[in-house]
Amino acid sequence: MRHALSILLVLVTFSVHAADLSQLMQQVKANPQGQLDTQLKHPAKTAEEHFLLAYSHYVLKNKEAALEFSNKAMTLEPDAELAGRILLMQALSYGVFYRDTAMAIEKLKLAEAILPEQDTTAIRSLRMDILESFAQAYNQQGNVELAMKAATQSLTLATQAADKQRQLNSMIMLGRLHLQNNNLSKAYQYFKSSLPLASEMGDQQAIASISMRLGMAYQKLEQHELALQYFNEAARLYQQLNSLSAQVNALINSGDSQLVLKQLDNAKTTYNKALKLAVESEDPYMLISAYVSLSELALEQGDLDQSEQLLTKAHQLASQLSAQSIKAETALFLANVFIKKQNYSAAKIMLDEAAPEPDKLAAFLKRKHLALSAELAALEQQWQQAYQLEKTANQMEVAELNDTSKLQLDNLQSSLELQLQQEKQQELHFSQQTQLKYWLRISLVLLTIAVLTLLLLLSKQKKNRSGPLVQMPQWRSFTELLLHHHRTKTQGHLLLVMPQQRPALLNKGIQQVSTDLEGFRLILDQSLFWVEQDQEFWLYCASEQQAVELQHQLVQSLPEDYQAHSAVLPLHALLSERICEQDLDALRELVWYSLYLAEQQGLKGALHLGYQCHQSRPCAWQAEQLRQDLFNAISLGLLEVQANGVSLSAKLQSQLAHI
């Protein structure tokens, strides 16, 4: 059965940092069009007003307008807390409307990075919203470890704050994650705790979600009659709630159980209804799931060509998304079809594409990958390899399906207030208890080793929270964060260090170069934040003094055989207060042009560049002929460039005077 395809990115709606704004948002949510009508009479002026307009469009699902007004709000110098809310809303827009999980995570990182340090009620609320969204987004990407960490942190904060709604959201999320990884015992505990809370709050959405997950749990236990009843109940509740994508998800799971029960006509009807609704909802994830379901039906009916065609559509669509687990799952389904068609080379390609790093797959995907790899090895008469792969897959299956989990699910079933009248579940057992206990002991040993390894890795990766604000891995994220700080600080400076790594790579090799740069990277964290871009290290510093001190430390930390160019750039003098991302990109051109001028003047070795502006914003940074503009600014004395204390501007002007 499919599990990753049934996990949706449903990011939570958030509260606002101030009580009055929270009330305004509730009014907007109840009547978003009314807010837009008010805008026509009284145009928005402040960051908060533009934020409310963006929220109106978000509620109305006007995705372009929601982003447009939220971007406008960011340009009006919101305080750090409101800026965090705006970034969180942008993450919601990218995640919900565009299904762009990578961009959603990027926005969430920015929102988390600018959170103020004080621990107020509003900040805790914002932090919990961000963590919940992180959990949803990481789960969508198939990164269960990070999703689990974020959901656990959110639950801890919600419990401390006695916030019942967030407690409920976090418990359901943790239950889903454990269910997805076949840890049914843990999933049971979270669902059992969340159900009374959902009933107390009258949260029909949460009750529907729990029903859906119970159906999925019984599916895993191959109790498809029970699973079908829970899925039908979930579909009914989601239809009442007008939650189209969730209704599609429930219908597809219902069809899956009907397929296993050999109710082929019912399954076809259910799948086609789900496909129609998926097209209406314009939800690519549900569309993928519908294609896969119909391919399974075609496979059951022996139509391999039809199954391959449907799966190819699903895999092509999954490849366009950023959810790695869904792409891996469709590749595994295709590999299965290719094996049945005896197209072994195509099957190998799909297996490799599904798991470039098999150990990072979710448990159920890893087991399926092992089973298919074993089947393929056996068909190619690689008996020893097939035996080892099959043995590992069986060990995982024994560890997943144990009596304790089944009995606990049975207890949960009897405690549900929304349960249907069901027949008592038959007691399940394994035929050979001795073999089961043996494999369980083996699994326990392997699990212990895995946990110890994970703890060791986490201890190495943990960073001091009181240290630098954040390390941004992408240039775009770096520039967005820099833009926010630039509007609030007047002394910010950029430091650029360019260690010439190519000679060292040729002489020493990759491993030694990596060792050489370890001390260098530790010093980078003394800046507020930094990014590595094409072997260029860009750092944002609060003052010129800090930038110069860091420049000296970084250059001195490198071995002598590295030739490191560096530059300190005064942002406000070069770019003025109002800047955009394209201006920052242009600074890279300024540095490279400075290096070119230094080479033309015969300067050799490591160069330390400095800049002094005799006119604010001395250059049109977005000009098409940027180098010509730089030449003009330097030759006219508007911008002075120095390399190792030598004025390149004076040399250039002297040369021009002799022409």
Image: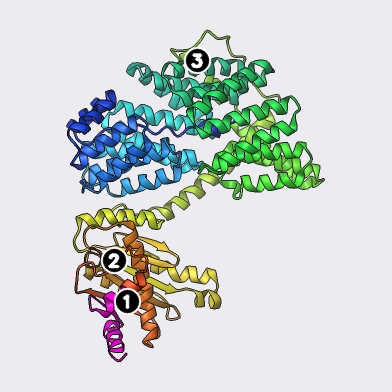
Q: Residue at x 32, y 64 (%)?
A: 539
Q: Is residue 128 above or below residue 613?
A: above
Left or right: where 604 falls relative to 117: right
The kind of secondary structure element at disc 1 is: helix
Judging by the rendered image, the residue that carries numbered circle 2 is: 620
Please tell me which of labels 1 and 2 falls first in the chain.
2
Mark pair 1, 2: CA separation: 12 Å
Left or right: where 74 falls relative to 297: left
Quarter of the figure with residue 2: top right
Q: Residue at x 29, y 76 (%)?
A: 632
Q: Is residue 38 visible?
A: yes
Crowding at dot 1, Cα within 10 Å, few <14 / some 14-19 / many 20+, comes out as some
Foreground label between 2 and 3: 2
**In the drawing, what numbered circle is on residue 367?**
none
Magenta residues, start to end: 630-659
Residue 647 in the magenta stretch? The answer is yes
Mark pair 3, 1: CA separation: 71 Å
The kind of secondary structure element at disc 2 is: loop
Q: Quadrant of the C terminus?
A: bottom left
Please tell me which of labels 2 and 3 falls first in the chain.
3
Judging by the rendered image, the residue that carries numbered circle 1 is: 631
Q: Residue at x 28, y 77 (%)?
A: 634
